[in-house]
Image (cartoon, rainbow, N blue to C red):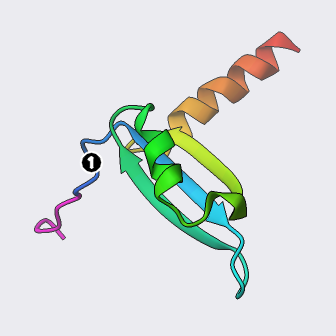
Amino acid sequence: MTNVVNLHGEKRWRAVMEYQHQTGPISIEHFFEEIAELHNIIERGPEWNTLIRCTVTLNRDDDGGQQNASEQAQQRESH
């Protein structure tokens, strides 16, 4: 679909927050430019005491696949 616009394509970082909820864990995805913004995202909620985990990655077209492949190749070479 060529008419789809990705509003997050220009943001550098992607964070997936997993929170405990009465119906079970929920995940919320955030996109932001500066890593310092992460603090405000967490503070805005949901309640930060229910945060299970926060995974931050570079917002890349390849979903980090190339980066992960390079890291794995380096690990194999070092062993």
- Return the x and y of residue 44 as percentages of the image width and height: 46, 57
Q: Front-most of 71 and 19?
A: 19
- Return the x and y of residue 68 as percentages of the image width and height: 62, 34
Q: Where is 10 relative to 25, above or below? A: above
* Disc 1 target residue: 9
Residue 13 image-quadrant placement = top left
- Please give the range of residues in magenta: 1-6
Residue 13 visible to the viewer: yes
Question: In the orientation shown, which residue stands out farthest toward the bottom?
Answer: 23
Residue 11 left/right relative to 52:
left
Q: Front-most of 56 and 77?
A: 56
Asked which secondary structure carries label 1, the reply is loop
Residue 20 left/right relative to 12:
right
- Return the x and y of residue 55 as percentages of the image width and height: 62, 47
Asked if residue 29 lies in the magenta stretch, the reply is no
* Residue sitting at x 19%, y 71%: 1
